[in-house]
Image (tube, helix red, strand yellow):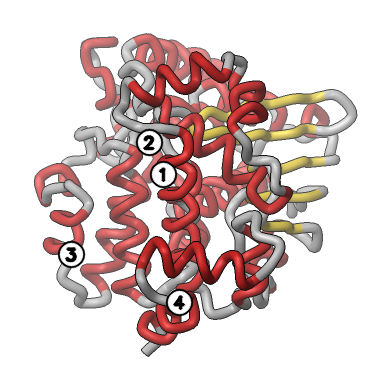
Amino acid sequence: MTARNRIPHNGASQGANFFPTAAGGISRCAFERLELAGVAAGPLLSKAGLTLDEIRDPARRIRVSDQIKFLNLAARALKDEYLGFNLAMQLDFRELGLFYYVLASSANLKEALERATHYSEIVNEGVTQELHSRNHHRVLVRYSGVSRHLDRHQIEFWMAALVRICRKLSGHRIIPKHVRFVHVRHGDHTRFTRIFGDDVKFGASVDEIIFATDFEQIPLIGADPYLNKLLVKYCEQALANRPGKIGSFQSHVENAIVPLLPHGKAEVGEIAHRLGVSRRTLARRLSGEGLSFSELLEDLKLHLAKRYLADGNLSISQIAWLLGYQEIGAFSRAFKRWTGKTPRDTRSVMTA
């Protein structure tokens, strides 16, 4: 264990220092990639609202929203549309600090997965991980206080790292039964099937991994009940001292809207129902943030349209469907109203 990963002696007062890469580890991995590639990272950090001091200090927490921005900017600068996934495939798990060691010292793979779920908010307070175990193990990832549609690199890092950790700790080539991502990708998925298996789908209603393997019957190579008991103590202290939930009601509404858009069900009544509030309460809470549902919906569609247009693998008709338009013409008219340009003209400028 390196010096920066040693267990501190003064208990809970260390807070986030228990976890050297807490809430920012992926950003630091991306920063290293930029430096290795000779790409100036300073301007990208500034655009994401980050500083060099934050990125170079592993004890500093980085806001999840800033991390997502930085990963998107870094991916474009590196011309790597699979940046998050690629970073996960190159990750040295020891860089995760005590979070990794509390998993590695667990008795079996099921216990390690339970630990990963319970302590996930320590390493990323914008993501909530749930574990449902019955006939299989279902890991469900939800975004809390962060707009899911802004991200693809962080979630792909998260999922790929989880599968790699399961393989590393058990010595078995664990392959999920299926993997689902909310964001959209088209084209060749070969790189994903190598780690996730053949059943990988994008544009799903949830982010999840299902494992059919009986993890309780798979002991871990580094199981150490004495070390695990000690590390659980520190993890519980860090969990108790974690920051409060971040974000806005807007992000909750956006996260409810995106999966429903292709099905034409992103209406205010349905969204209110899914969030467990009345239409009046939804309108009031959005109004408190200076928004209306119609404005939020239009802005969200525009943002998604621009992102989809930048993806050369998506046709205009596919983009129209993803945004809830039954006809290309309706989408084109809406897009021109938003931007003054047609989707095709905008794509030609993006890809020039």
Q: Nearer the viewer, mark 1 or mark 4?
A: 4
Marks 1 & 4, CB-CB < 8 Å contact: no
x%, y% of residue 34? 26, 68
**Observer-nearest of 122 and 286:** 286
**Observer-nearest of 329 and 237:** 329
Name the residue: 38% across, 77% down.
Answer: 79
**How far apart in space, not on screen, are marks 4 and 3 (Cα)?**
33 Å
The numbered mark, 3 or 1, whose residue comes first in the sequence reads 3
Question: Which residue lies under the disc numbered 1?
Answer: 94
Q: Residues within 10 Å of mark 4 (few under 14, many from 20)?
A: some
Q: Please tell me the numbered disc located at residue 97.
A: 2
Report the amino acid beneath label 1.
Arg
Report the amino acid beneath label 2.
Gly
Q: Residues within 10 Å of mark 1 (few under 14, many from 20)?
A: few
**Observer-nearest of 223 and 85:** 85
Q: Nearer the viewer, mark 4 or mark 3?
A: 4
x%, y% of residue 71? 35, 57
**Observer-nearest of 89 and 65:** 65
- The answer to whether 313 appears left or right of 201 in the picture is left
**How far apart in space, not on screen, are marks 1 and 2 (Cα)?**
6 Å
Question: Which residue lies under the disc numbered 4?
Answer: 342
Q: Nearer the viewer, mark 2 or mark 4?
A: 4
Name the residue: 53% across, 71% down.
Answer: 332
**How far apart in space, not on screen, are marks 3 and 2 (Cα)?**
25 Å
Report the amino acid beneath label 3.
Ala
The numbered mark, 3 or 2, whose residue comes first in the sequence reads 3
